[in-house]
Image (cartoon, coloured by chain):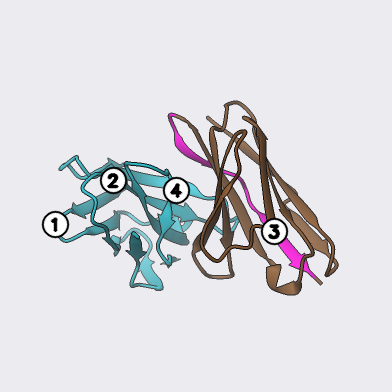
Chain colours: A cyan, B brown
């Protein structure tokens, strides 16, 4: 079974600075998808960014970018120019490209933005 | 974009009673619905996967007789917590597939059993 590990329970960053959240995963599959989700205090899950494993190019969405290292099974999220609204729980998630489309989530990282 | 309406957002029930949580896709057909449970400050744990018109597939360790899932139509899936006990208190989230957006999450239900 696939597992996702986020080794940083909490992170903090100064407003306008850059922060990187770590995620590693374990799988024997070669084709899959990886996601970063944001869960603010409202608890509504919000998709931040998505990466297809077959794509070598790292995904970017405005201030959010990933560093996808397939061989190392690493999928970190970089947030540039951090804003107060970025404060939330961040979850890394894995989905197989085959079979069930279920998402497997990591433990989450609570990000605090210091003004 | 796609929307999944989840109700109720909060519910308090007495121990021994049953509670039904609904997830309704408003503008798309939810071919598959996933039900997750989230304990305070913890991750989302998949409980079951439901497809319209078929029995739900439960994850290992999830009591299928306690957590009844029904996906009778392409727009509605329900989770019923039967004979609820305080240890069932948690945050329950549904998410549906069926659009180009990928996963559409409901807003969650906070269940408190007293």
Answer few, some or many: residues within 10 Å of disc 3's Cα (few below 14, many 20 plus, some between 14 and 19).
Answer: few
Task: Return the x and y of residue A101 as percentages of the image width and height.
Answer: 42, 43
Is-magenta flag for residue B110? yes
For label 1, the residue is A71
Which label's residue is closer to the chain start, 1 or 4? 1
> Do pointers 2 and 4 mark residues of a single chain?
yes
Q: Is residue B62 visible?
A: yes
What residue did someone put label 3 on? B65
| Alpha-carbon span between mark 3 and mark 1 | 42 Å
Task: Give the number of the disc on residue A32.
Answer: 2
Q: Main secondary structure of the magenta part?
A: strand
**Chain containing mark 1:** A
Q: Circle 1 sits in a helix, a strand or a loop, which is it?
A: loop
Give the residue at x 29% y 64%: A22
Residues at marks 2 and 1, CA–CA distance in whole angstroms? 13 Å
Q: Earlier in the sequence, mark 2 or mark 4?
A: 2
Q: Which residues are magenta?
A: B100-113
Indicate yes or no whether the magenta region holds residue B108: yes
Question: At which x and y percent is residue A105?
Answer: 42, 58
**Quadrant containing the C terminus of chain A in the rendered view:** bottom left
């Amino acid at each position: 079974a696939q597992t996702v590990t986020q080794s940083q329970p909490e992170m903090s960053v100064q407003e306008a600075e850059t922060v990187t959240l770590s995620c590693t995963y374990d799988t024997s599959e070669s084709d899959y998808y990886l996601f970063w989700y944001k869960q603010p205090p409202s608890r509504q899950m919000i998709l931040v960014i998505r990466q297809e494993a077959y794509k070598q190019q790292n995904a970017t969405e405005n201030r959010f970018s990933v560093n996808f290292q397939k061989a190392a099974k690493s999928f970190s999220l970089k947030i540039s120019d951090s804003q107060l609204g970025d404060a939330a729980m961040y979850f890394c998630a894995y989905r197989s490209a085959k079979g069930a489309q279920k998402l497997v989530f990591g433990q989450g990282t609570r990000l605090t933005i210091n003004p | 974009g796609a929307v999944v309406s989840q109700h109720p957002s909060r519910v308090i029930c007495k121990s021994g009673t049953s509670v039904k949580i609904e997830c309704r896709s408003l503008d798309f057909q939810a071919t598959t619905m996933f039900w997750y449970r989230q304990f305070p400050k913890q991750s989302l744990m998949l409980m079951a996967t439901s497809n319209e018109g078929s029995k739900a597939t439960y994850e290992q360790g999830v009591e299928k007789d306690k957590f009844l899932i029904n996906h009778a139509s392409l727009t509605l899936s329900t989770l019923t917590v039967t004979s609820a006990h305080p240890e069932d208190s948690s945050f329950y989230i549904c998410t549906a597939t069926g659009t180009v957006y990928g996963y559409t999450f409901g807003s969650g239900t906070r269940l408190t059993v007293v």
